[in-house]
Amino acid sequence: MAIDFKALAQKYDTPLYLYDFDHIRDRYMQMKEAFGGSKSLVLYAVKANSNLAVIRHLSGLGAGADCVSIGEVNRALAAGVDRYKIIFSGVGKSDEEIKEALTKEILLLNLESEAEMKRVEIVAKELGVEARISVRVNPNIDPKTHPYISTGLHENKFGVEIDMAKRMYIYAKRSKYLNPIGIHFHIGSQLTELEPIKEACTIAVNLVRSLRAIEIDIKFFDVGGGLGVVYDKEQTIEVQAYADMIFEATKGLDVTLLCEPGRFMVANAGYFVTKVLYEKENSGKRFVIVDGAMNDLIRPSLYKAYHRIEALKDDGEKRVADVVGPICESGDFLGKNVPLPPLEHNDLLVVHSAGAYGFTMASNYNTRGRSAEVAISDGDDHCIRQRESFEDQVRLELACDSSWQK
Ligand code: LLP
């Protein structure tokens, strides 16, 4: 389906996030079918795009949610995800978050340190409940991705070493307040090679077997997220090959497989539409200045990530330009050396593959209101988040008493 960017930009103004919900459905079905026939659950990693409508859409198709804060857990619940399809990971859960997660009886808390396990035990004891837990193992594997999104090496803060994981399972098994039923790993994001995931799987499978030998029965085998997508010309992992590798690695184990795709579900479904404000040249270097900026889409600035940028006009000779926003930072760019035709005030540019880690990483830097978000579904467009106004931004400041300054 061709998206009428011009009409949508006119209707909702720019900068604007658009998400193709039909594409999201296709991606979910692809994943679900690849795992079909096995006991499995696709837990959408909410951090990639946490708009309630996106979660509701995936939940309606049967997805659960992988969450990394109690805020995300509450989003998942508010969007209709069943509590027993929600898991909560993260290296730093507060007592309040642990308490709320236990009270809400979600499927699993993924533990990332021994100290955290002890806190969960204390909180569970206070509540008089048994916490269902999973331990995130750090298999010390180089996932061959950007260092900022690599998470499975000992130098990264995530998870625990195998020996420590084993000690944690043994401790948890003895505790009245902990029920160790899951194992988890996630070695990184935007992964384009299967081999590192396979190695991590093997390490986790071996641990499950050794735990079974001491009567610790792991029921949930969570392979994390991380499947890469095409931003440019990447060779990505085929979903069926991914699922088959996991089946092979876990053969005979009789576990429920959990996977936590985020980017895979939503990245390519998203477009960031921005309007040209001006063109300028500094000593022959061409800049196209647009109304979208690093506060809207920080991936290019933060990771030097590439997002294809397309002009919605084709006349005139293309010359390279840096596409930059209005923010007072040299790092404020959406693309470098982008071949673009001559552009005029109000021409539109479409930034592709912006559905994951786009809006969720947006900020109000420079007191810029965050963009509106729009879903396109079955040929219709629906606003799923209004554009943020100045009043929205200052509401919590104005709510405080400022009389002490008078
Ligand atoms: N599960 C866990 C435990 C995770 O930490 C992550 C992502 C996921 C699942 C989902 O990974 P995915 O399938 O989306 O690759 N902001 C960065 C990505 C950070 C990913 C953090 N963890 C970016 O824009 O590339």
Image (cartoon, rainbow, N blue to C red):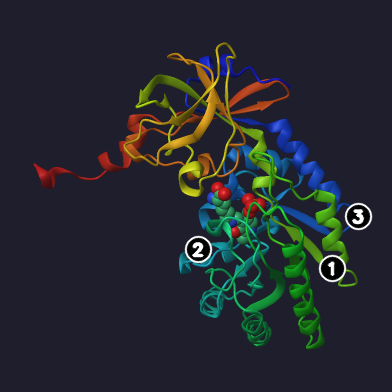
User: Where in the figure is residue 44, as x and y percent of width and height?
Assistant: 67, 50
Q: Nearer the viewer, residue 105 or 388?
A: 388
Q: Secondary structure at mark 2?
A: helix
Q: Are marks 1 and 3 in contact (CB under 8 Å)?
A: no
Q: Which residue is mark 1?
A: 249
Residue furthest left as drawn: 406
Alpha carbon distance from label 1 to label 3: 16 Å
Side of 118 where 237 appears, left or right? right
Estimate the x, y position of residue 55 in percent, counting from the top left.
Answer: 64, 43
Q: Which residue is mark 2?
A: 97
Above/below status of 268 relative to 208? above
- Image coordinates for residue 95, horizontal then vertical, percent: 47, 69
**Residue that appears at 73% across and 34% down:** 23
Quadrant of residue 232 in the image? top right
Does residue 290 appear in the picture of this structure? no
What type is the residue that disc 1 sits on?
A: Ala
Q: Find out whether the residues at labels 1 and 2 contact each other: C-beta distance under 8 Å.
A: no
The quadrant where residue 331 appears: top left
Q: Earlier in the sequence, mark 1 or mark 2?
A: 2
Q: The residue under label 2 is which amino acid type?
A: Glu
Considering every residue shown, the one lying at the far top of the view is 315
Residue 201 can be seen, yes or no = yes
Label 3 sits on residue: 37
In this view, 321 is above or below 173: above
**Separation (CA) of disc 3 from disc 2:** 35 Å
Say which residue appears at 62% left-offset and 43% top-offset: 79
Name the one closer to the observer, 372 or 336.
336
